Image (spheres, grey):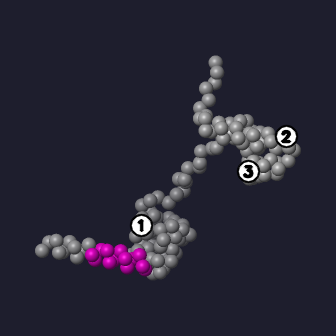
Amino acid sequence: MKKVSSINLADRLQAASRLNVLQLAEKLGSISEACRQLGVDRRSFYTWRTRHRTEGFEGLIDRLPIHRSHPQTTPEPVVERIKELALMYPEHGCNRHEKTLAHEGIKISANAVQRILNRAGLGSRKARSQASAGAAARNQQDTDKARSGRK
């Protein structure tokens, strides 16, 4: 019985071209020259060579990317609460938010709070103040629209 390979054609062609680089380097006796001729980064060459030695031809196939989720990722409700606090109290920094969250039973470091605020574009006091003012203006417009609709 033949073993049916689950490798698609594109992956096989890519692995074959990588094997070609390895074979050329062996033939020339110079890794640098082989990489130069084929336009390959030497760092990639060494990665492929190591994987080829340990895993064979299948090691030359690209691997699936590492999943972005991490077991210690801050839960989304906590991230939303941090953003909410930042907009409610733009003058407070990450240390103050850390203490506020601790009183609410949420254990998170000040560094993690700052990192979350930076990703949300709320890392500086100025950015939080501007975002808070913009949110207040939108809320006022919504309130005005609701009132004018009732009359």
Give the residue displayed 80% in from the left and 47% down from the top: 34
Q: What's the residue type where badge 2 is placed? A: Lys
Q: Where does the image place residue 131, in percent across and percent down from the top left?
A: 41, 75
Q: Which residues are magenta?
A: 129-141
Question: Which of the labelled discs sits on residue 40, or is there none?
Answer: 3
Taken as a whole, is the magenta stretch helix, strand or loop? helix
* Residue shown at 87% from the left, 44% from the top: 29
Q: Which residue is mark 1?
A: 81
Residue 54's x, y, as percent? 75, 39
Residues at marks 3 and 1 touching, judged by CB atoms closer than 8 Å: no
Viewer-side residue, 11 vs 120: 11
* Quadrant where the image shows the C terminus: bottom left
Element on which disc 1 rests: helix
Q: Is 12 included in the stretch rendered in magenta? A: no
Q: Is residue 104 above or below residue 64?
A: below
In the rendered image, which quarter is residue 10 located in? top right
In the image, is 128 to the left or to the right of 68? left
Q: Earlier in the sequence, mark 1 or mark 2?
A: 2
Nearer mark to the viewer, of 3 and 1: 3
Mark 3 / mark 2, whichever is N-terminal: 2
Q: Residues within 10 Å of mark 2 (few under 14, many from 20)?
A: few
